[in-house]
Amino acid sequence: MSLFDYTVIIVAVAIVVLTFVLAITYLIWPGERQDEHIKRRILDDEEVDRE
């Protein structure tokens, strides 16, 4: 294997590891803090008139 092959493999592994770390990070700490975020409207416990 040449230096180019090792470079491509190292870059690919770095991208995969970075993607995995970011996915786990945003899964654990999503960071939506705004009161107007769609999550707040969906999880709101108010009664909804469904007629």
Image (cartoon, rainbow, N blue to C red):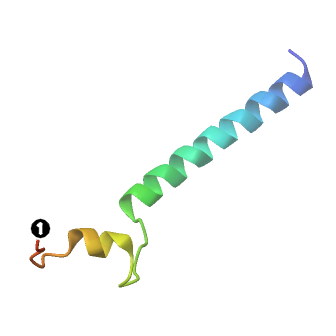
Q: How many marks?
A: 1
Is residue 30 shown above or below 5? below
From the viewer's perspective, tell me whether residue 41 is left or right of residue 32: left
| Residue at screen point 12% across, 79% down | 46
For the point 75% across and 28% down, the residue is: 9
Residue beneath the point at 61% across and 39% down: 16
Q: Is residue 35 above or below residue 39?
A: below
**Can you say which quadrant of the picture contains the N terminus?**
top right
Residues 13 and 48: in front is: 48
Residue farthest to the bottom, as pictured? 35
Disc 1: which residue: 50
Q: Helix, strand or loop at disc 1? A: loop
Apparent side of residue 3 relative to residue 26 in the rendered image (left or right): right
Q: In the image, residue 30 lies at what x, y percent?
A: 41, 65
Q: Position of residue 35 (x, y in %)?
A: 35, 85
Q: Nearer the viewer, residue 6 or 39?
A: 39
* Pointer 1 local density, CA inside 10 Å: few below 14, some 14–19, many at least 20: few
Residue 19 in the image, given as x and y percentages of width and height:
58, 46
Instruction: Choose top left, top right, bottom left or bottom right for residue 34.
Output: bottom left
Please state if 22 lies on the left or on the right of 11 as rendered: left
Q: Give the quarter of the figure containing the C terminus.
A: bottom left
Q: Position of residue 24 (x, y in %)?
A: 44, 51
Relative height, residue 29 to residue 21 (above, below): below
Q: Residue furthest top?
A: 1
Q: Amino acid at mark 1?
A: Arg
The residue at 41%/74% (across/down) is 32
